[in-house]
Image (cartoon, rainbow, N blue to C red):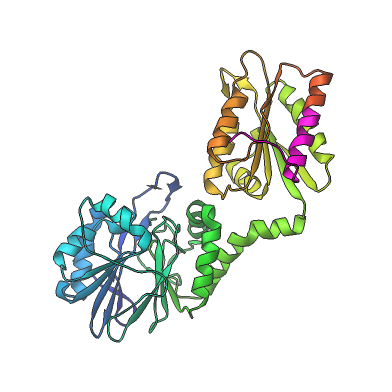
Amino acid sequence: MVDKIVNLVKDVYFTGVFDPHIRTFDIIMKTANGSSYNSYVIRGSEGVAVMDTVKKEFSEEFFTKIEAVCDYSEIKFIVLHHLEPDHSGALLELMDKAPQAKLIISGRAVMMLKALLKQDVEFEIANTGKIISLGDKTIEFLSTPFLHWPDTMSSYLHEDKILFSGDVFGSHYYDERIFNDKVGDFNYAFSYYYEHIMRPFKQFVMQALKLYKKFEIDMIAPLHGPVLRENPQQYIDKYDQWSNNTQNKKAILGDKIISIFYMSSYGNTEKMAKKIYEGVDSIEGIRPSMYDLGSLDERNMIDLLEESDGIIIGTPTINGDAVKPAWDLLACMAYIENKNKTGGVFGSYGWTGEGTEMIQGRMRSLKFRLPLDPLRIKLIPNETELLDSYNFGIEFAEILMGKMVEMEL
Ligand code: FEO
């Protein structure tokens, strides 16, 4: 039994479910106060559209809600904005119950649909500009890929000016009062969600915002967390600001930014770092900085990696490996757009010294441009080796400024 079905506006219903106990989402996100899997039903004069389903384990509650607002025979369209299982978990069962309904997915979802359902189903593709009609309700689709999977799309209900945004503008935040003007303070959840889900795809966020601009938006209905009906523009503005902040910061600073991150157990790798810094600093147009990895938290690492054009990592080799903070730094690359960054590696070692190669290998697989071999020095760098470090900095900076070199592919 559902106590009461909530209307977003007349004839648009919230049919999502709540998951107050989830504590980790997609492995990488902590969900301290749970989440919701939002679904909506739109009733028009000529049929009904179901906008997304829910996670499979919540199917029963979902179907109770659907049955409270429509008969399965009325469903004309099932729209899936994004195929991740938290939204497609009840799809097959819904298609069984409403076999006449047309499934609408994005073009990029086609391959995924088959892989996910393990069977063939009929569907229709919606690209930007496609319109479907429920008589007195008109839904227009917008292609907003990579937010958060390649298949994600959004849609706009013209008559009620509601944007169904998929994962965009979502929050993992459980509150059954649903609307942003009624729920508790979810600012943290909203920005945390952006940081972990949207930030690596800023270019795609900006493209989506351009598409949304075409519409007057009275309400945003995302796939997780509160429905944004009070001042929805503030959330659009936040996405706009967050997605542009690196470019804005770079525009203010002007120069190319090189960050030298290092960790040193006996001060030898640090000595190399200082000389590399001096070498980098001698080149016009570069703004270098040095950071002791032991004193950076993850948030700082992400911000610094994002704004840096060149990233040089210094690690000793301990027990045949690079040190953990160096690996932690590279793990942060998952949260940023890492294209077009140039990388370099250096470090002092006692016995075998494979830590630098290991970091270089990881950077290679992360698609860094790596013009120089790792610079390794055994134990305490002597004057010649410090000069090598200085020259490494110069060479790296010159390459970043455009000097042509041959690189291994
Ligand atoms: Fe809410 Fe990307 O799934």
Q: Quadrant of the C terminus?
A: top right
Residue at the location (22% across, 63% down)? 122
Residue 407 highlighted magenta (yes or no): yes
Residue 10 or 21: which is nearer the viewer? 10
Out of 208 and 368, give the one closest to the viewer.
Answer: 368
Q: Is residue 277 above or below residue 202?
A: above
Q: Is residue 232 visible?
A: no
Instruction: Report if residue 378 is visible in the image.
Output: yes
Q: Position of residue 296 (x, y in %)?
A: 64, 39
Please indicate whether residue 100 sits to the left or right of residue 85 in the image.
left
The spot of residue 95 in percent (x, y) is: 19, 64
Quadrant of the image occupied by residue 105 = bottom left
Relative to 406, is 63 above or below? below
- Residue 71: x and y, percent? 16, 74
Please tell me whether residue 310 belongs to the stretch shown in magenta: no
Q: Quadrant of the N terminus?
A: bottom left
Q: Relative to residue 136, is residue 182 depicted above or below?
A: above
Lateral position of residue 320 relative to residue 174, left or right: right
Q: Residue at x 49, y 73 (%)?
A: 212
Part of the protein shown in magenta: 389-409
**Outermost top residue:** 351
Residue occupying image coordinates x 60% and y 19%: 318
Give the image quadrant in which the ligand numbered 1 is located.
bottom left
Q: Is residue 386 left or right of residue 195?
A: right
Q: Position of residue 106 (x, y in %)?
A: 36, 64
Residue under the image location 52 percent in, 58 percent down: 191
Question: In the displayed structure, does residue 160 sit left or right of residue 259?
Answer: left
Position of residue 140 relative to residue 275, above or below, is below
Counting labels gives 0
